[in-house]
Image (spheres, grey):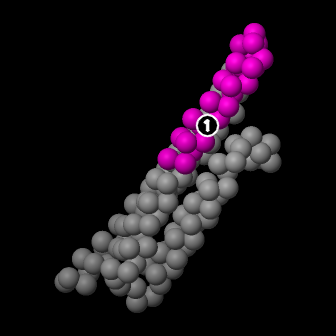
Amino acid sequence: MMIFWENIGFIRWPMAFAILWIVGLCLYSASQLFRPGAHASLRTKAWLDGILFWGAFTAVTGVLGSLVGIIVAFQSVERAGAVSPTLIAGGAKVALLSSALGFLALGAASLGWYLMQMRWRILRARAAG
C-alpha cells in the first residue's frame, strides 16, 4: 500500500485532502439523516451535495496527475534516447494510478451520496405528509 501511495506522486496530497472531505461529509450527513427524529433540512442537503463535489474533484485531480505523470515519463524517455518498451509501460502504469484512485473515490462518493440522498428524500416525503 505504501508503494502505491508513493507512486502516485505529488498529486496524492490534494487527492488525500479531497478523500478526507468525502469521508467527513459522509459521516456528518449520515449522523444527521439516520439519528432519531431526523428531518430533511436544506442544510443537510447542502452537505450531501458536497460529497459529490469532492468526489468529482478527486476524479479530475486524478486525471490531472495522470497527465502530468505521462508528460514527465515522456520527458525522461526523450532525455534517455532509446529505452525499452517495458520502461515506457511501467511509467504509463504509474501515471495512471492517480486516475484509478480518483475514479475509485468518485465511485465511493457517488454511492454514499445516492444512499443518503434517498434517505433525505424519504424524510422529506414523510414531512410533506
The stretch in magenta equals: 60-88
Residue 14 falls inside the magenta stretch = no
Q: Is residue 71 visible?
A: yes
Q: Quadrant of residue 98?
A: top right
Label 1's element?
A: helix
Rendering coords of residue 117 (x, y %)? 37, 67
Name the residue: 60% across, 45% down: 101
Task: Categorize mark 1 by other alpha carbons within 10 Å: few (<14), some (14-19), many (20+).
Answer: some
In-image side of 95 versus 44 (left or right):
right
Rendering coords of residue 80 (x, y %)? 78, 17
Tag count in the figure?
1
Q: Which kind of residue does numbered mark 1 sit on?
A: Val
Q: Quadrant of residue 74?
A: top right
Q: Nearer the viewer, residue 55 or 84?
A: 84
Residue 10 drawn above or below residue 121? above
The residue lying furthest to the right in this view is: 2
Q: Nearer the viewer, residue 98 or 119?
A: 98
Name the residue: 52% across, 77% down: 28
